């Protein structure tokens, strides 16, 4: 996989060329130039940290002892440690960085606790799992046991603790009210795809709707929109509304395990809400770039994370290509035109990554999403209403629970029907590096040409709001 496996050097070269090109094309548009320069600096930072990450690989197969702070517990068998001291044969190696520890018992390891762990450093042979490790900043796994884990200091974060308790309550509430057929789907929809189980994820992926189980823009948008709508009925000031919704979204990020797609969507939602507070026009492209920059500077290795890649590229594709596709399909009716345009525009930049990650493409995804997205939206609302009423011990929670069951059965029927369509899923071998980067090169060239010579107009003007027909530049 060429995004995941790439070193910082190609990005530095490409970033520098893009910066020069953008400066030549739009010398007054400093926002994009500044963002690119900051991203280049970020890759330099990642390169420097990468040398430190490479150090841990030199201890493969050796017994070491690590001390640090527990950052997260991705599942019941693993926990991620921010290591500040690594000992080999009693000597401090000078290593500092993140390390995934596998103990198969994480009850001692609350987020925020300082621990000492002894174990053997291993490097996974599976490329996909190695990419996952890189995405969380760890290039190795420390195989240990619960007996080899010692809590040196208990200082668990109250936010993380309460978030983990909230997630556990959500799981229990769903398990106690739904069958094993419906419960995993709802847990995946609210807490993320890993909660739904491998079989359900693969079932959704075969028809191109696995994104519904990856908590992202759709889910965050519904939650933020519902909260904002509820606050419209009160006398809360716009600033208080912004702080309240943003605070809830931040907590929701912790509940879902700080998924990159949730973080990206939450930051973008906060940017949109903030633009309403300061009464300024919100530019989607700049908001996405700003969001990616914040996430990236917090963790430069996030570029290795497949969830971040898919979330960022799909959102960027919608911003860039939706207006043009909406024009082409405008005669199909408002709903069909919008749904088809969103689905296709989201796929444009994903194709190479999907091929190299899953060795397949799903042509029927356009058909499936027309029905599945609205069903999933209603399912999310009914499931959230079920949780709220359940938490308040109001017996009416069985009504939204019943609605959720009906919708899940409709979605299963849809999936079973679409799966019977011939060539709904096409298996494709991974493409070469030249084809991978060549594809994005052609897309970039087409966008530059369109911006320079055609304008790529949407219903109100150009695709990029800051560039008007007259050539004036709005740098605010």
Image (cartoon, grey):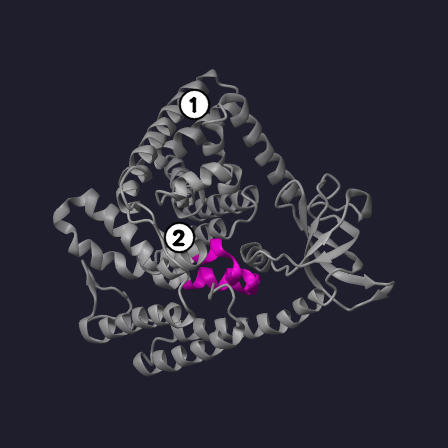
Residue 254 appears in view = yes
Mark 1 or mark 2, which is nearer to you?
1
Tell me, for residue 277, which label it has, or none: 2
Q: Secondary structure at mark 1?
A: helix
Q: Secondary structure at mark 2?
A: helix
Residue at x 72%, y 64% (from the top left corner):
96
Q: Which picture quadrant has residue 419? A: top left
Q: Is residue 333 left or right of residue 79?
A: left
Q: Nearer the viewer, residue 241 or 361?
A: 361
Residue at x 43%, y 44% (from the top left corner):
220
Q: Residues within 10 Å of mark 2 (few under 14, many from 20)?
A: some
Q: Which picture quadrant has residue 58? A: bottom right
Task: Point out residue 146 in the picture as x, y percentages from the top left corner.
Answer: 78, 43
Magenta stretch in the rendered image: 289-309
**Residue ID for mark 1:** 401
Report, in whole angstroms, how far the alpha carbon at label 1 lies from the one at label 2.
36 Å
Number of marks in the image? Answer: 2
Task: Point out residue 192 in the picture as x, y percentages from the top left corner.
Answer: 49, 42
Asked if the stretch drawn in magenta spans residue 86, the answer is no
Q: Nearer the viewer, residue 61 or 150?
A: 61
């Amino acid at each position: 996989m060429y995004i995941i496996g790439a070193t910082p050097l190609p990005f530095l070269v490409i970033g520098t060329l893009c910066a020069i090109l953008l400066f030549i094309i739009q010398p007054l548009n400093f926002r994009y130039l500044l963002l690119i320069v900051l991203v280049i600096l970020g890759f330099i930072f990642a390169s420097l940290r990468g040398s430190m990450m490479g150090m841990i690989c030199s201890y493969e197969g050796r017994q070491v002892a690590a001390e640090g702070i527990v950052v997260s517990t991705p599942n019941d068998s693993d926990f991620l440690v921010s290591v500040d001291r690594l000992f080999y044969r009693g000597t401090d190696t000078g290593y500092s960085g993140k390390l995934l520890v596998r103990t198969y018992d994480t009850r001692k390891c609350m987020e925020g606790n300082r621990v000492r762990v002894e174990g053997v450093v291993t490097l996974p042979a599976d490329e996909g799992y190695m990419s996952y490790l890189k995405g969380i900043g760890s290039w190795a796994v420390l195989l240990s046991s619960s007996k080899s884990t010692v809590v040196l200091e208990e200082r668990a974060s109250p936010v993380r603790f309460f978030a983990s308790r909230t997630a556990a309550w959500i799981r229990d509430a769903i398990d106690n009210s739904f069958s094993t057929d419906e419960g995993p789907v709802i847990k995946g929809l609210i807490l993320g795809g890993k909660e739904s189980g491998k079989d359900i994820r693969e079932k959704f992926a075969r028809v191109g709707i696995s994104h519904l189980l990856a908590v992202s823009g759709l889910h965050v948008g519904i939650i933020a929109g519902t909260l904002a709508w509820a606050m419209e009925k009160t006398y809360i000031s716009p600033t208080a509304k912004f702080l309240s919704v943003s605070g809830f979204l931040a907590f929701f990020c912790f509940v879902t395990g700080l998924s990159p797609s949730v973080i990206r969507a939450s930051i973008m939602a906060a940017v949109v809400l903030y633009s309403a507070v300061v009464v300024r026009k919100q530019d989607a492209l700049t908001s996405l770039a700003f969001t990616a920059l914040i996430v990236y500077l917090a963790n430069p290795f996030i570029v290795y994370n497949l969830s971040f890649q898919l979330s960022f590229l799909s959102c960027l594709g919608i911003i860039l290509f939706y207006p043009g596709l909406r024009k082409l399909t405008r005669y199909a009716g408002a709903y069909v035109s919008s749904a088809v345009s969103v689905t296709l525009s989201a796929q444009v930049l994903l194709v190479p990554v999907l091929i190299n990650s899953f060795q397949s493409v799903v042509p029927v995804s356009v058909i499936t999403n027309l029905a599945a997205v609205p069903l999933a939206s209603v399912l999310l609302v009914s499931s959230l209403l079920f949780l709220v009423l359940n938490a308040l011990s109001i017996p009416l929670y069985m009504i939204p629970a019943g609605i959720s069951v009906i919708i899940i059965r409709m979605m299963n029927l849809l999936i079973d029907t679409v799966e019977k369509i011939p060539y709904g899923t096409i298996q494709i071998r991974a493409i070469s590096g030249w084809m991978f980067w060549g594809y994005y090169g052609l897309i970039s060239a087409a966008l530059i040409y369109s911006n320079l010579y055609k304008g790529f107009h949407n219903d109100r003007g150009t695709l990029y709001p800051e560039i008007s027909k007259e050539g004036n530049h709005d740098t605010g």
